[in-house]
Amino acid sequence: AETVIRGHVRPLHLFTAHGRQALGLKAVNRFFRDTEPWGVEILLHALGDRRGKRRTPPPDDDGFSAFITGLLDYYFETYRPARSAAPLLNGRDLMRHFDLKPGPALGKLLAIVEEERLAGDLKTREAALDFVRRKLEG
């Protein structure tokens, strides 16, 4: 419950970024990743909190409701199925292909690859290996 209460303002920040046309798919994916397993509850709490604070709905209430509905649809139809799919690479792959040692840097690389996969920017193992190669070179 504490996670839901602490996180209930994040959807409003996402909505604000959406209104400025500055909300990317990676930010939405980060929200769901960071709030697992409470993302859906946080969205619903944010919606209820926003509606419950006033006697009359805020001027952009319909837009906010539609935005939250869109995030929920995305979560159930796209994010959750993609998240449950096998990652393109694992730590052994990175150690073998790039002579890396276990540690935090390896975990960070895997997290970046996963973020790119969830955003649809990496679709194959070969593309993921090329991506990591470029990251390590740059």
Image (tube, rainbow, N blue to C red):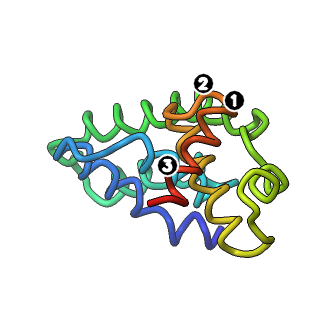
Circle nearer the viewer, 1 or 2: 1
Q: Residues within 10 Å of mark 1 (few under 14, many from 20)?
A: few
Q: Secondary structure at mark 2?
A: helix
Q: Secondary structure at mark 3?
A: helix
Q: Are marks 3 and 2 in contact (CB under 8 Å)?
A: no
The CA distance from mark 1 to mark 2 is 7 Å
Residue 126 image position (x, y, % from top left)? 66, 32
Circle nearer the viewer, 3 or 1: 1
Q: Are marks 1 and 2 in contact (CB under 8 Å)?
A: yes
Q: Residues within 10 Å of mark 3 (few under 14, many from 20)?
A: many
Tell me, for residue 43, which label it has, or none: 3
Residue 100 image position (x, y, % from top left)? 74, 66
Whichever of labels 3 and 1 marks the residue nearer the N terminus, that label is 3
Work out which residue is located at the far top of the displayed protein and give it: 77
Note whether 2 is above or below 9 in the view shown.
below
Tell me, for residue 89, which label it has, or none: none
Q: Secondary structure at mark 1?
A: helix
Left or right of 91 on screen, residue 33: left
Q: Residues within 10 Å of mark 2 (few under 14, many from 20)?
A: few
Amino acid type, callout 1: Pro
Amino acid type, callout 3: Leu
Assign the N terminus to one quadrant of the image: bottom right
Which residue position is annotated with label 1? 81
Which residue position is annotated with label 2? 77
Camera-side residue of 32 and 113:
113
Q: Residue at x 39, y 63 (%)?
A: 9
The CA distance from mark 3 to mark 1 is 19 Å
Note whether 87 is above or below 30 in the view shown.
above
Assign the C terminus to one quadrant of the image: bottom left
Q: Residue at x 49, y 34 (%)?
A: 121
Left or right of 70 on screen, residue 15: left
Q: Are marks 3 and 1 in contact (CB under 8 Å)?
A: no
